[in-house]
């Protein structure tokens, strides 16, 4: 009686490990441009926020994403201040230049549209 239970338990454990490995993926989530990375639906969003430029890089399982027709609206929340920024494709990233209030603890919410599909990524700057 113990053998069938052991077999079922072993199979269930193996499937759980395989599912966890698939869900966690094998792609690298480390920043490639010195920013903050978050993952949303297997897509990595890396936000680089400086006082004069905001850049958003997209990777799908470690590969660059075609952003030629992409857009993003970024909302920066610093203390009680709110700033909205439109990001446009520039080379391999979405970017905006100007004057931005960013610093430690600034929260950013990006609504990114790629191929007509919107996604929301949330960041907290270190």
Image (cartoon, grey):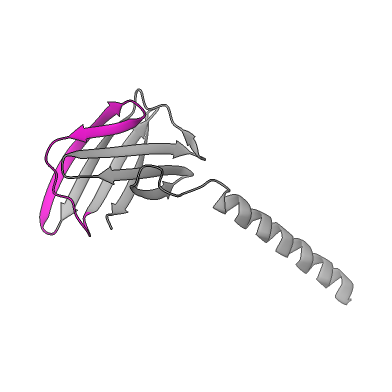
Foreground residue among 49 and 19? 49
Residue 69 falls left or right of residue 95: right
Q: Which quadrant does the N terminus fall into?
A: bottom right
Q: Position of residue 41 (x, y in %)?
A: 46, 45
Vertical relation: 16 (above or below) 91: below
Q: Within the image, what quadrant is residue 78 found in?
A: bottom left
Vertical relation: 71 (above or below) 101: above
- Identified at 20% across, 38% down, the residue is 53
Q: Is residue 80 magenta?
A: yes
Q: Is residue 4 magenta?
A: no
Foreground residue among 3 and 49? 49
Residue 41 falls left or right of residue 103: right
Foreground residue among 84 and 64? 64
Q: Within the image, what quadrant is residue 112 found in?
A: top left
- Identified at 23% across, 42% down, the residue is 74
- Identified at 46% across, 49% down, the residue is 29
Question: Which contiguous range is marked in magenta?
Answer: 79-106
Q: Position of residue 13 (x, y in %)?
A: 71, 64
Residue 23 falls left or right of residue 126: right
Q: Position of residue 79 (x, y in %)?
A: 13, 59
Q: Within the image, what quadrant is residue 71 found in?
A: top left
């Amino acid at each position: 009686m113990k053998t069938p239970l052991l077999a079922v338990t072993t199979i269930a454990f193996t499937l759980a490990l395989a599912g966890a490995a698939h869900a966690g993926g094998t792609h690298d989530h480390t920043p490639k441009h010195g920013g903050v990375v978050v993952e949303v639906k297997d897509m990595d969003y890396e936000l680089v926020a400086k006082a004069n430029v905001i850049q958003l890089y997209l990777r799908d399982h470690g590969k660059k994403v075609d952003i030629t027709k992409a857009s993003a609206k970024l909302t920066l929340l610093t203390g009680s201040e709110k700033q909205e920024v439109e990001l446009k494709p520039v080379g391999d990233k979405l970017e905006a230049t100007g004057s931005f209030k960013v610093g430690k603890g600034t929260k950013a919410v990006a609504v990114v549209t790629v191929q007509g599909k919107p996604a929301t990524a949330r960041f907290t700057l270190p």
